Amino acid sequence: MGNIVVGVADMKLSAQRGDIIVTHALGSCLGVAIHDPVAGVGGIFHVMLPLASVAPEKAANNPWMFVDTGTPLFFQQAYAAGAQKSRLVVKVAGGANVAQGEDFFAIGQRNLTMLRKLFWKNGILVKGEDVGGHIARTLYLEVGTGRTWLHSSGREWEL
């Protein structure tokens, strides 16, 4: 039993029911939490940018950096660990504009748009989300129960 920390442009999966997976500082980045309640497999993916085509060499070295390369790999690894698509509970957080003023590059919104396109094309339904806005979030997943919650600015809420 322990906390497993997911860094930026990274993912972690666990089948240990006592584990809590956490990722911090979801600003424009997205955190994708998945949980299969039957297999007891859960994970979080922390992704930075929408498209690998902006830096193919970086994508080759770290596919977790990009929505379009990391998302399919994340789900494939969850399936390899025993999760089944039909049972997955998927939740998404982040995609904010945390910069002061105009969000010229709209990275958070572009990340969310790319993720939704991938989910739509692959028949993945999102059970809960807390996206957009102007706050950074910390995302937690309790592997044993599938409980997913967020923390920001001293406040905590269920997702």
Image (cartoon, rainbow, N blue to C red):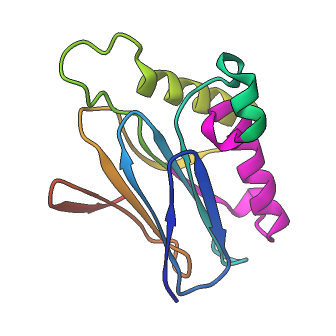
Q: In this view, does 32 lie to the left or right of 158?
A: right
Q: In this view, does 72 lie to the left or right of 14?
A: right
Task: Compare residues 48 and 80 and report the one nearer the observer.
Answer: 48
Residue found 76% across the figure and 67% down from its top: 83
Task: Find the magenta span and give its range.
Answer: 62-91
Q: Where is residue 141 in the image (x, y as percent from the top left)?
A: 47, 68
Main secondary-structure element of the magenta-colored stretch: helix
Q: Can residue 73 be seen in this view?
A: yes
Q: Horizontal and vertical percent for residue 132?
A: 34, 32
State the image quarter where residue 105 is shown.
top left
Q: Looking at this view, name the residue that lies furthest to the left.
A: 154
Q: Is residue 148 above or below residue 25?
A: below
Provide residue 13's location: percent of width, then percent of height: 65, 67
On screen, residue 51 versus residue 32, left or right, reads right
> Is 139 rendered above or below residue 9?
below
**Can residue 120 be seen by looking at this rendering?**
no
Is residue 39 part of the magenta span, yes or no? no
Pick the quarter of the image with the C terminus: bottom left
Q: Which residue is drawn at 31% across and 15% down?
A: 103
Query: 99 and 128: which one is in front?
Result: 99
Question: What x and y, as percent, mark residue 57?
Answer: 75, 27
Q: Residue at x 71, y 18 (%)?
A: 53
